[in-house]
Image: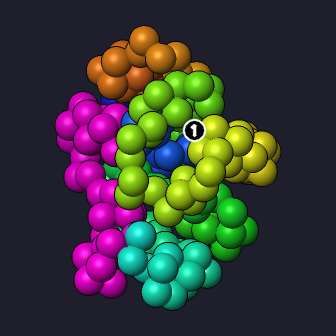
Amino acid sequence: MNNELKGINVFLIGMMGTGKTTVGRLLADELGYRFFDTDVLIEQIAGKTINQIFADEGEEAFRELESQVLSELAAYTKLTIATGGGIVLRRMNWSYLHNGLVVWLDAPVEVLIKRLGSDSTRPLLQTPNPTLTLQTLLNQRRNLYAEADLHISISGSDTPEQITSQVISAIPSVLKSPLSP
C-alpha cells in the first residue's frame, strides 16, 4: 500500500467526534507514516488550549493558525494528518489538502453526540443545544467535506480498526495509475 501511495500525505477531514485522531494513528502505523494532529500542533505553537485560543483571540485567529500549521505539514511527505473539523472552511486550505489524499470520515450527528456528549473541550459545542449546533455545522460543511477523494461512512458500531481497514481498502480505488507509454 505504501508503495502505491508513493509517499503522498493522507489528510483526514470530517466533523469533530468522527475519530480522525484515533483512526489517523492506526492508519499511520499501517502505512508506515508519521502521524500529526493539527489541533495538537496548534496548541503546542500557541502555548494554550484551543478553548483558550477561541476565548482569548476568537475563531478567526484559530483558523489562521490552523492554515499555517496545515501549510507547513503539507510540505512534507509520508504523513497521516488528522485535521480540525472546520479546516475545510477556508478555500486556501484546499490547496494544501489537494496535494495529498483527502479522506472524509462521515458519521451521523446522533453518533457524534453520543461520542461528544460530555466533552467540554470543544468550543463550538458550548451551546444550549449541542445537537442542533452539530447538525448546523454539518449542514454548512457537508458540500466541502464531499470534495474529499474518499468518503468513508461510519456507524456507531464501527471500531477504529474497522474504519482504518475501510480506508486502506478504499485507497487503491482513488489512486491515479501512472500513464502508460
The reply to whether residue 31 is visible in this rendering is no
The percent position of residue 1, horizontal first and vertical second, equals 34, 29
Colour mode?
rainbow
Q: Is residue 91 above or below residue 56?
A: above
Tell me the quarter of the picture where residue 28 sits. top left
Query: Would you name the residue on which mark 1 appears?
Result: 104
Crowding at label 1, few (<14), some or many (≥20) Cα neighbours within 10 Å? many
Magenta includes 55? no
Q: Looking at the figure, which quarter contains the C terminus? A: top right
Residue displayed at 41% across by 22% down: 163
Query: Could you say which is closer to the camera, residue 107 or residue 2?
Result: 107
Q: Is residue 92 above or below residue 36?
A: below
Q: Amino acid at mark 1?
A: Trp
The percent position of residue 88, horizontal first and vertical second, equals 64, 58
Query: Could you say which is closer to the camera, residue 132 or residue 33?
Result: 132
The percent position of residue 124, horizontal first and vertical second, equals 56, 59
Residue displayed at 60% across by 45% down: 130
Q: Judge from the rendering whether residue 75 lies leftward or rightward of residue 141; answer left or right.
A: left
Residue extending farthest to the top is 157
The percent position of residue 12, horizontal first and vertical second, equals 47, 45
Q: Main secondary structure of the magenta part?
A: helix
Residue extending farthest to the front is 128
Residue displayed at 50% across by 76% down: 54
The reply to whether residue 43 is visible in this rendering is yes
Query: Could you say which is closer to the camera, residue 99 or residue 47?
Result: 47
Q: Which residues are magenta?
A: 21-50
Q: Is residue 74 above or below residue 103?
A: below
